[in-house]
Image (tube, helix red, strand yellow):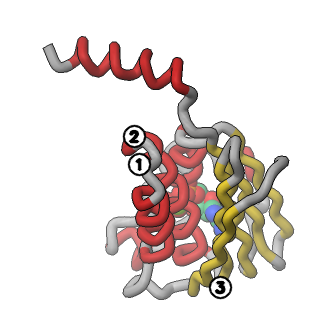
Amino acid sequence: MHGKALEWAYEIEGRDFRNAGKVSSKVKEILKELGFDPAFVRGVAIASYEAEMNVVCHADKGTLHFAIFPEALKIVVEDQGPGIPDIELAMQEGYSTAPPEIREMGFGAGMGLPNMKKNTDELNICSTVGKGTVVEMVIRPPSPENDQDEAIVRHHHHR
Ligand SMILES: Nc1ncnc2c1ncn2[C@@H]1O[C@H](COP(=O)(O)OP(=O)(O)O)[C@@H](O)[C@H]1O
Ligand SMILES: [Mg+2]
């Protein structure tokens, strides 16, 4: 990606359910503050929340890097953890290896990776079993024409 970026990095602790979600709240806050489209911000927040929760639920610890480029946002979440042996399988809706104690807290529906895919323009996952995982997401803000299309659709729905 070209041009200058604004960048942030936040640490995420595995199994720290008390602070879980704080990093993606921060990302959301920054984008709101900068005046990004609310629907766009919502999508980014979902993708970043799911990536953050995957570190909390499945890894030891990690870092979320968040960068705003003129043409897109980039979120890279890298962790130290068990890694993902079969990424294609992990991407399936409903697939989860979350243990019972995590499911009891309401996580482990197996929709995190599919939701990340849905809410991003690019999703790349690199994982080494026994070492960790790197999830890279690129999200492009809506162009002015798309904005107009969305406004028309919204208008229809509200009638
Ligand atoms: N960062 C990660 N480290 C290790 N395994 C992961 C990671 N992210 C996802 N996975 C694996 O992929 C599966 C599917 O992830 P996801 O779709 O987010 O569902 P869920 O988190 O609800 O289990 C997880 O259950 C886990 O086995
Ligand atoms: Mg998940």
- Dot 3 or dot 2: first in sequence order is 2
Pinpoint residue 74: horizontal percent, then vertical percent. Answer: 69, 54
Q: Is residue 53 above or below residue 12?
A: above
Residue for point 33% across, 73% down: 105
Asked whether disc 3 touches disc 2, contact meaning CB atoms under 8 Å apart, the reply is no
**What amino acid is at disc 2?**
Ala
Q: Quick one: SS at disc 1?
A: helix
Residue 39, numbered circle: 2
- Label 1 crowd (10 A; few <14 / some 14-19 / many >=20): some
**What amino acid is at disc 3?**
Asp
Choose mark 3 or mark 2, whichever is in front. Answer: 2
Residue 60, numbered circle: 3
**What amino acid is at disc 1?**
Arg
Q: Quick one: SS at disc 2?
A: helix
Report the Cα–Cα distance between label 3 and label 2.
Answer: 32 Å
- Label 3 crowd (10 A; few <14 / some 14-19 / many >=20): some
Residue hosting label 1: 42
Pinpoint residue 25: horizontal percent, then vertical percent. Answer: 42, 68
Look at the image and tell me whether residue 14 can be seen.
Answer: yes
Q: Quick one: SS at disc 3?
A: loop
